[in-house]
Amino acid sequence: MRLTGRCYCGDIKYEFEGEVQGALQCHCRECQYITGGNPNVVMVVPESGFKITNGQPSAFARSDLERSVTRYFCPRCGTALGTRSPARPGSFILKVGTLDDASVFKPRLAIFTIDKQPFHYIPEGLPAYERRPG
């Protein structure tokens, strides 16, 4: 699969070529902070096929957490682009909203539904887990 995307202002652009490892909704409280209240919708891709083609994203990792994720965003417009997580070495967790064609996203599961808010939507029949599946 070939994917392309960018931040809101267009300063950061990326492309991905390869097999998508996962497509999911994350309802954890941390993702709710990052998205402004909604679940995070992401595609997990191998880092080997992902590259920034324009610009340089800024990075943020919490220093108070032992295994903090690193979040990447546009320093100009603030668009969240994706995440690298110690739980997924060798992968990049790509924000679906940054894709040039977000219609390719088909969620395969929902995780951390223990933190799900009443206004969050999980499609009927989508496998859902209170935490990360085993």
Image (tube, grey):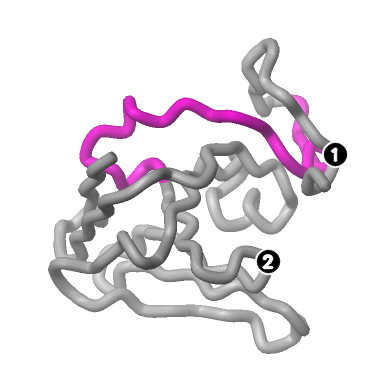
Label ID, residue 87? 2
- The quarter holding residue 89 reads bottom right
Asked if the magenta segment contains residue 113, the reply would be yes
- Could you tell me which residue is drawn at 63 percent across and 53 percent down? 31
Label ID, residue 84? none
- Could you tell me which residue is drawn at 31 percent across and 62 percent down? 50
Asked if the magenta segment contains residue 102, the reply would be yes
Instruction: Say if 82 sits above or below 67 in the image.
Output: above
- Could you tell me which residue is drawn at 38 percent across and 59 percent down? 81
For marks 1 and 2, give the CA distance: 17 Å
| Residue 66, percent from left and from top | 77, 84
Q: Would residue 82 be found to the left or right of residue 10 on screen?
A: right
Dot 2 falls on a residue whose secondary structure is loop
Magenta span of residues: 96-118
Q: Amino acid at mark 1?
A: Glu
Q: Amino acid at mark 2?
A: Ala
Looking at this view, is 23 or 10 the one in front?
A: 23
Dot 1 falls on a residue whose secondary structure is loop
Mark 2: few/some/many CA within 10 Å (<14, 14-19, 20+): few
| Residue 19, percent from left and from top | 39, 45
According to the picture, the residue beneath numbered tag 1 turns out to be 130
Instruction: Say if 116 sits above or below 8 in the image.
Output: above
